[in-house]
Image: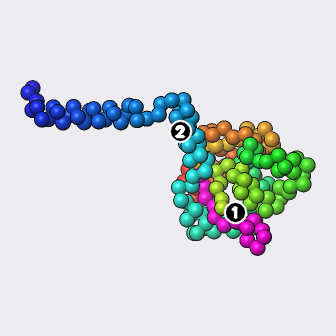
Amino acid sequence: MNTHPLLAAAISAAVASIAACGGDSLDNSSTGQAALVAQGQQIFRFDTFGDETQWTDKLRLHETISTKVDPTTALSVGLKVDAEALPPAVVQGIQNKTISLTDPATTVALIKLNAVVGIKGTVESVNGKDTLTRVGVTCALCHSTVDNSFAPGIGKRPDGWPNLQLTPGPSLPCRRR
């Protein structure tokens, strides 16, 4: 088959352009790979993709969490707490029971620390009290769990493992079927 010289030149230029995109312009070093992994982990753990509109503006979930959801209740429906996100004073307070796991204010404090796996919230001081003003859900809610090394539902998180204890209800986008 006889190919027109201009067509052959255009195809060659296109192939060269495509090859260049995958070449030296990408950082294939271990430092570059580590940075990409860290960026992906941040997105997976903390990006809500704007779903605060649903959970805060429409459903007003932040109000319910702030007033009715204590850590014991949250753990009972399968939410998880990343023990590695807890500062030593909080760990000690949970262990010696000076931090109440039956107070919704503790849930707000855990959300502020980014310790509740899959929940991203905005906590602001309102009249001198930490108040959950926005809440969203991340991929990690359904696709991370903890190893229970601290207590049931509290431990080190292995990302990518399904949260088999989560009882999400019908409205979560990643619910099990």
Q: Depth check: 16 or 174 in front?
A: 16
Residue 84 spot, x, y in % from top left? 74, 43
Q: Residues within 10 Å of mark 2 (few under 14, many from 20)?
A: few
**Is 123 situated left or right of 150 in this image?**
left
Residue denoted by label 2: 36
Identify the colour scheme used: rainbow
Residue 27 spot, x, y in % from top left? 47, 34
The image quarter containing residue 58 is bottom right
**Is 37 situated left or right of 23 in this image?**
right
Q: Which mark is residue 123?
A: 1
Above or below, 10 against 57 in this view is: above
Q: Residues within 10 Å of mark 1 (few under 14, many from 20)?
A: some
The image quarter containing residue 171 is bottom right
Q: Amino acid at mark 2?
A: Leu
Taking the view exactly as shown, the residue that stands out farthest to the top is: 1
What residue is shown at x 82% (from left), y 50% (from top)?
Answer: 90
What residue is shown at x 78% (from left), y 62% (from top)?
Answer: 104
Cα separation, mark 2 vs mark 1, equals: 28 Å
What residue is shown at x 57% (from left), y 55% (from top)?
Answer: 48
Q: Which residues are magenta?
A: 123-138
Q: Depth check: 64 or 10 in front?
A: 10
- Is 118 included in the stretch rendered in magenta? no
